[in-house]
Image: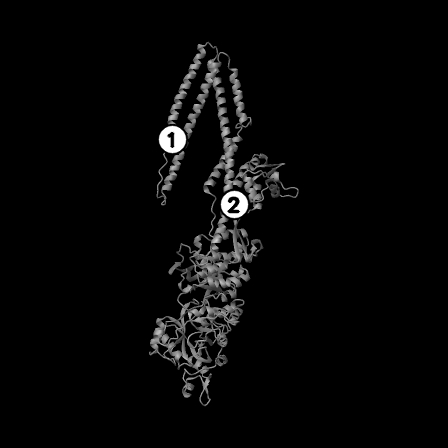
Amino acid sequence: MIGSCWNKWDLHIHSPFTNLNNGFKCEVEQYVANIKENSLSLLGVTNYWYFQENELEIIREELRRQGCSTTVIGNLEFRVAQPNKQGDWINVHCLFSESLSTAQINAVVSRLKLTNTTKDDLVIYCSEADFATKTIGCDDAIVDFKSLCEHMESNLVFGRDYLIAICPNGYGGYRPDINEGRSRAIASEIDKKGQVLFGRPQDRDFFLSSTRYEGATAKPIFFCSDAHRLDQIGTQYSWVKAKPNFQGLKQVLFEPSDRIYQTDDFVENSFIKPYFDSIEIEGPIFQGQEISFKKQNIPLNKNMIAIIGGRGTGKSLFLDAMHSRLAVCYGHKRVRGVSVENLRIRVSQGGDLINFDQTSTVPYPYLHVSQGEIHEFAKDPSVLSLEIKKMLGLRQRPFDPALSEELMENMGRYRSFIDYWGAVDTNGSAINKPDYQQNIININSQLIATLTNEQNAALISRYQDNNRLLNEQRAFLSTSNEIKSFIERTVIGLNDRISAYNGSAYAISKSPPLGYTDVLQAIAANVAHTETSVAVLAAQNEEIKAEFAQKGIKQDVSSLLGKVNEYRLNIDNANAKLQEIQGRTSQYFSEQKRRAEIAASYDTYLESLRGEVDIAYASLLAPNADWNAEQNELVQSILKDIQVSGSILFDKGAFYSGLEECVNRGKFRASAGKSTSERLAETFNVHNKSDFFKMLMGHKLIQLGDQLVSLEDFFWSDDYFNQGGRFELFDYLYSPSRIKNYLKVNAEFSYKGKSVEKLSVGQRGTFYVCLKLATDPFGSPFVFDQPEDDLDNGFIMGQLVPLFKQIKKYRQVIIVTHNANLVVNSDAEQVIVAENDGEVVSYVSGALEEGDVRGGIGIRSMVCSILEGGHEAFANREKKYGL
C-alpha cells in the first residue's frame, strides 16, 4: 500500500546449488539465514547455464519458512563467444520474472544451442542432461550472444518474462570505455542489447550518460556480490526504490538515476525530512450530509504521492481533510466546510511521530496549495506582489513609530493652530491676528492719555510702570503653577513607563526613576521671590494713591487709577498676546518645515522597502552554505526563468479617487469632457512619486487660477474645502495609514523575460509555484491540488515533472491530478486511487509498478483507465527504453 520504498537488492548472488566454484559448503537453511540477516529484499539467485532441479522453489520455500519476505528471481549466467580485449569470454546474464518456475526456465534454455559442438560435430544444448552426456563443463561452454537474445525473444516475452544483464568490468567484462575500434564496436553492441548492468559504483555516471554511443540511453548499474561463499553475502548490494519484484526491476530501468544507488551514502538514505506518515479516516465528511469516509488507515510514502480518481470520487477530499485538521488551528475557514468525524494524521518529524487528531490544538505548518488558489493570486498582480513579498520573508515593516507619533502630534498642533488663527470675537473679528492686538494697544494708550495732565502725569506714569510689573509677575506666577503641574504629570507618567520597562526580562540594567525635586524647589523659590515682589509693588501703589492727596490733586483717585489699571492691563495683555501670536506663528512655520522633513523620511523609508525586496531576492540567488550542490543547483534551476525586483508604485487613479473625498467637489465638477479626477490632476499636477513628495515638501505645483501655489497655500483656500475638509486632506496626504493606499512598494516580477502585464494567468501561476518552491524548497511537505488547472502546460512537462523528481528527495510531495504525465513521468512512488461507492469514499494505494494493464488489475491498470493519456504515458516511457 505504501508504494515504492528503498530496500537492498543483490541481483547476482549464487546459492549452494551453483554449478561452478561452489564455496558455500552449507545447507540452504544457513544460506537463507544469512540472506535474512543482511536484510536483502530481492535476490537474483544465479547459476551457470541452467538451474538445479527446483532450485528457486527450494530457496523460496526456505525463505517463507524462516519468515522472510525476500523475493527470488532467477539469474542465469552465460559466457558468450565474443571475447574481450584480454581474450576472456564475456559473461552476460538473463534475469527471469518470479512468475517463472525453475522448470519453466530450464525448459526454455534447454532448447538453446551452444556454440560448442561434440567431437562428432553434434549440437550441444544448454541443459544439465546434454552437458552430462556430451561431456562439456560449465566453464567450457560458450554461446553466441545474438543467438542467445533471439532464442529468448522467440520463447519468452521480453520485458515481461526476462531482461538481459551485462557486465562492463571484471573477469568476463566487456569494457565499454575503451577506444580501440573493434573492441569498442563489440562493447557498444552488447550495451545496446542489455537493459541491466552489473558493475561498480564508479560506473554509474558513465552508464547514465547518453553520449556513450549514438542513440544510447541511461541504464542502471547494479552493484552485486557475485557471492560464491557465505561470507560474501551482504558485502555488495544496491539500494533500490521499487517493489522487490520483476516489475519493480523494470521500474528502475525507467528511472536509472533516481531509483537506484550503489552505496549507503545517498541523499534519501541520509537526509531527514518531515513527512506525513499515515492518515486514519472514518465517518461523515460534511455536517448534515450523507457522504462519508470508509474507515481506513492509509500509510503514506515519504517521497511523492499522486492521488487520482474519477470526477466525484473524493480525490481532493483527501487533501481537504488533511487541511481541515492541520491548518484550521490558524483560524482559517475549513476547506469547503470539511469536518471529518474521525481523522488522525501522523507526522514524522525528525524521526519522532506526532499525532494530529480531534484533541490537537497546535497547527502543523506545511505548504498547501488548494485547487484554484493559484488562479486567485495570479489574476491580480497586486495580490501576487504581496504573496511574493511574503515568500521572500518580507513582512510589512511600519514607518518609524517615533516619526509616526511625531507626525500625529504635528497634525494635532496644526489643527490647534488653525482653530487658534480662526478664533473671533462677538463681532466676528479675528482676535489672534497682530493687527487686532495692536489696535487694542493703541486704543488703550489713547485712553490713558486722556486721563493724564501736568499734575498727575508723573504719578500715573509710576502707577502704570508698577502695574505693568505686577501684571508680568502675576503672569509668571500662573506660568510657574502650570509648569509645576505639567512636570508632575509628565514625570509620573514617564516613571510608570520606566518601571514597566525595567520589568522586562531583557532589561538587565535597571533604569532609575526620574527625579524632579530640584526642579520643583527652584520653581518654589521663584514663586516665593515673585510673591514678595508683588507685595512690594502693591504697597508702592498704595503709596502713590496717598501722594495724590498730599499734592492737592482734586480728583477721584480710586476711579482714575482704576481706569488706568484697566487700560494698562488691556495693553499688557495685548502685548502678551502679540508675543504669543509671534510664538505660535513661528511654531507653525517650524511645524510646516518638520512635516516636509518627515515626508522626506517617508520617501527614504519607501526606498529602503524597495531595496529589501532586491536584497531578499539576491540572497535567494546566492548559494546556500547549508545545502549540498544538488540542492543549490535545484533552486537555481527553479529560478532560472524568473526575476524579482522591488519597485515603488504611485497609483494615480487611487490617489485622485481618494483626494476627491477631501475637497469641495463643486470646484472640480466634471465638465468639458473632463472627469473630476482629470480636473483634480490638472490642479494638483501630481503624476508620480516624485511629484507627490515635491508637493509635500512645499514646491509650488498646485495650479490656482493663473498661479502655481504650494500645498500650504492651498490649505488656506477655504472655498476649496467643505467643513473639516482641510484636515481630511491633511490626514490623507501625510498619514502613513492613508498614504499606503496609493503609494506602496511592490515586488515586480517577470517570467521568461515577460513583464507581468504580458503574462497569461497560467504563466503567472507558474511563476508563483516556482518562487513558492524556491523560497521553501526543502522544508515541510508540499501539497498541491490539481496543478494542471492553474499552470502553463509547457511548464508542467518541461519543468514541473523534472522538479518533482528532484525535490521529492528533500520534501514529501502530494498532488491530486488528472494528468497522467505528472504521475508517470514524475515517477510517483505511491499512487492513491479514490473510489466512491454509494457516497462512501475509500482509497486504494500502491506503486506504479504494481498490476497488469492487460489483465485490468492493480495500480498500473487504474492509472490507464482513470487518467487521460495514461496508456500513452506508460507506452512512451517503455518505448524509450526499448521495452
At label 1, counting other C-alpha atoms closer than 10 Å, the crowd grade (few under 14, some 14-19, many 20 or more) is few
Give the side of residue 874 with respect to residue 531, left or right. right
Query: What residue is drawn where x is 44% and y is 25%?
Result: 475
> Which residue is the site of mark 1?
519
* Helix, strand or loop under label 2: loop
User: In x, y percent, where is residue 457?
Assistant: 49, 14
Q: Is residue 119 above or below residue 811?
A: below
Quick one: which residue is furthest to the top in this view? 552
Q: Please give the label number shown on residue 740.
A: 2
Could you tell me residue 441's position as x and y percent? 52, 22
Q: Whole-percent x and y of residue 510?
A: 35, 41
Say whether residue 285 is visible.
no
Mark 2, Cα crowd under 10 Å, few <14 / some 14-19 / many 20+, is few
- Judged left or right of residue 11, residue 798 is right
Q: CA distance from mark 2 to mark 1?
A: 44 Å
Amino acid beneath label 2:
Lys
In the image, taking residue 831 as reference, residue 672 lies left or right, namely right
* 328 relative to 596, above or below: below
The chosen color scheme is one colour
Q: Secondary structure at mark 1?
A: helix
The quadrant in which the N terminus is found is: bottom left
Determine the residue located farthest toward the right in the rendered image: 672
Q: How many marks?
A: 2
Q: Position of residue 523 (x, y in %)?
A: 39, 28
Q: Does residue 117 appear in this view?
A: yes
Which is nearer the eye, 95 or 190? 190
Q: Which of label 2 and label 1 is nearer to you?
A: 1
Q: Which mark is residue 326?
A: none
Q: Which of 517/63 is in front?
A: 517
- The numbered mark, 2 or 1, whose residue comes first in the sequence reads 1
Amino acid bearing label 1: Val
